Every structure is written in structure tokens, then in C-alpha cells.
Image (cartoon, rainbow, N blue to C red):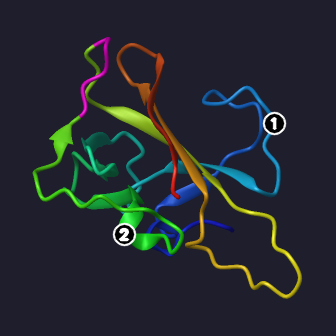
Amino acid sequence: MKCPKHIENNVISLPNNNKFIEYEHDEYHLPYLVKCKCGCEELEIMTNPEPRILARCPLCGEKITIYNLRYYPAASLIPYDGENETYISPAEDTIFNIYVVYEYPELEGEEVFNPNDITWCEVYGFGIESKNIFQIINHETA
């Protein structure tokens, strides 16, 4: 499974054309469903302007880093020291199934794959109450 090290124990690979996505992904665009180590897949979303995206499990309280520029070697970071805010969707959802797509560059020559070397990230929340998809972030790391 290709995903950043910080989330490898908190994701499930998604097939193409599932309830979160309707388009095809390839070996460079990898979709996942975020889950807590306790097994919960219905999570709160926390954000900040850095941008940083976290999930918080309402059952056990675990916080899961979904996207954080500090972990990616090619990232351009503007540090933010403020608090993370709980995301509330336009339909007023506060609990979501969270879907994330990590994009990786094509390797050239003798380059070695680095799971933290992502070039782009998309995060979506599927509102448990509204049954709607909301884009949380669509961000290039560099």
C-alpha cells in the first residue's frame, strides 16, 4: 500500500467507482478511506489554515493526521501555531466517512520511492447525516 507513513495504519484502500469517488485512479493517485485503530470509520474532521487536516474518533478520542505539510519532503510550509477547528459541513454534518487521495510523482532514473513524497492531496468528507460529499482540501504540497 502506497501512502504516507503517518497514516499507513489508519487507511483502507478504496476501489475505483465507490460511494466516495466516481472516477478512475491509477498507480500515482491512490484513494483511501480513513479509519481509527479502534475500527470506527465515522470521524470528526479538524482543520487549520497551514493547511493541516486531522480526524478525531468520537469513540476513543484518537487523532489521526491525514495531511500535514511538515511530513512531506517537497512541501512548502507556512507554519501556523493556532488551534485546529472542527469542520462543520454546509449541511451541518459534524461526523464523516473521510476519503483521501494521495498523488505521487513518476519516478525517474534511479529515484527510490518515498511514501512521504506526495505531490498533491485531496480530502473529502461524506456526511453521515446528509449523505453528501464535501471537499475539505485540494492542495499541492510544493
Residue under pointer 2 = 70
Question: Is the magenta region chiefly helix, strand or loop?
Answer: loop
At label 2, the amino acid type is: Arg
130 vs 133, nearest the viewer = 133
**Are there few (<14), some (14-19), or many (20+) residues within 10 Å of tag 1?**
few
x and y, in percent, of residue 109 in the image: 89, 82
Residue 119 image-quadrant placement:
bottom right
Query: Dot 1 lies on which element?
Result: loop
| Residues rendered magenta in the picture | 87-91
Q: Earlier in the sequence, mark 2 or mark 1?
A: 1
Neighbour tally class for label 2: few under 14, some 14-19, many 20 plus, Cα within 10 Å: some
Residue 61 x, y percent position in the rendering: 19, 56
Q: Which residue is mark 1?
A: 24
**Circle 1: residue type:** Glu
| Between 124 and 19, the one nearer to me in the picture | 124
Residue 47 lies in quadrant: top left
The reply to whether the C-beta atoms of the residues labelled 2 and 1 are less than 8 Å apart is: no
Residue at image x 69%, y 52%?
30
Q: Is residue 50 magenta?
A: no
